[in-house]
Image: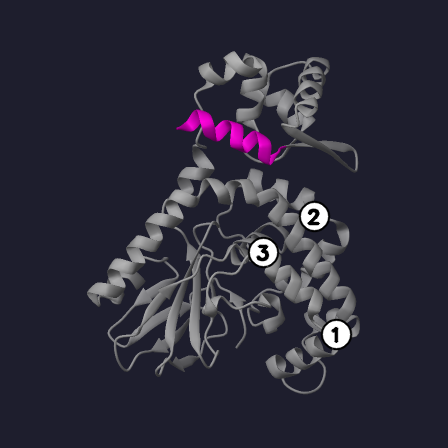
Amino acid sequence: MGAHVIRTEAWSELRFSSTPQISISISPHLTVLAMIADALAGRRRGLPELWRRTISAHVRPYGHEAVRPLAAPGRTVAPDSLVARSPIDGDVTVQSQLSALQDTAPDALIRDMEQTFGPGAPPAHWRAAAEQPRRWLHGYAAALADVWHTAEPLWERARPLLDREIERVGVAAVRGRPELLFGSLSDRIVSTERGLLISDPEATGYDLGDRRIVLVPMLAGKDSVIVSLDDPEAVWIAYPVRGADSLWRQPVRPSVDELSALVGPIRADLLCALDQPMTMSMLATGMKIAPSGLTYHCDRLRAGRLITRERRGREMWIARTRRAEELLELFRR
């Protein structure tokens, strides 16, 4: 069945014959995939519009091209190469996912498509990838890297939410009450006496057997769910981590007074505003500061290695550096 992104009112059924074993994997590459599906492929899953625009603007043209197959309406099944590193064996970093894609031979992608879609020509929306598999692998890896560059600071701020989710899953596993946990993952997942119903336009039935279930919390829109139901070792389900909406609405801010004493009030406000990369025009509008003044303060922050500047087309994009994140973290404690 492969990895697929879900949204409809049809349902696939995952049937249990006994209480399943559950575990958790903290694997941000599935967060990146969910953001790609939402922001680039148009499968809207609740990602805030500002983030959708920011992510789209940061992905290079051949990355946009590579993710077009995900935009096919009513089609969720995709080659397993979409998730080159499965989360069933533990945590998967974005870098290891990128390395796995780089190591994937074009012939392996073709075989993967044949296994997913059957012999002969793949569906129309995957034919361009089948005709130029190396180009698709390169473009898809570039899209992953570009989205992660934008999303990584937000992921780091989500660590407390992920830690709480690890504890929540662990408690459910120890107490043997996974049905309570499953019922709270997403509105797109329904726990029943027989197992799980998962929203899916290409609905079918699966037996869990003696496989375990690996849960993968994501920092994604509230309606985003990604599943893989046909792995012989385990089923994995990626879902929005609880409380993620608080990160979209109210970013954790440092003590501005203390930070202002160090870098100055305008630069402190500027650093706090950069919870995600922004253009100079976005910053100028949001902070109500003249472009010339904004340029001056950005120059000073860049000299201190607290921001980076990158031109994309006609826009100059500003982002906080890891050095800035570490500085801000000092004032959040």
Image position, residue 168 (x, y; %):
29, 54
Q: Do the residues labelled 2 and 3 touch (CB within 8 Å)?
A: no
Packing grade of label 1 (10 A; few <14, some 14-19, many >=20) is: some
The residue positioned 77% from the left and 68% from the top of the image is 134
Residues rendered magenta in the picture: 320-333
Choose between 189 and 157: the one closer to the eye: 157
- 51 up-or-down from 239: above or below: above
The residue positioned 41% from the left and 80% from the top of the image is 205
Type of amino acid under label 3? Val
The residue positioned 43% from the left and 45% from the top of the image is 159
Disc 1 designates what residue?
106
The residue positioned 46% from the left and 60% from the top of the image is 225
Residue 94, which numbered label? 3
SS at circle 1: helix
Choose between 54 and 164: the one closer to the eye: 164
Type of amino acid under label 1? Pro
Image position, residue 213 (x, y; %):
37, 71
**Mark 1 or 3, closer to the camera:** 3
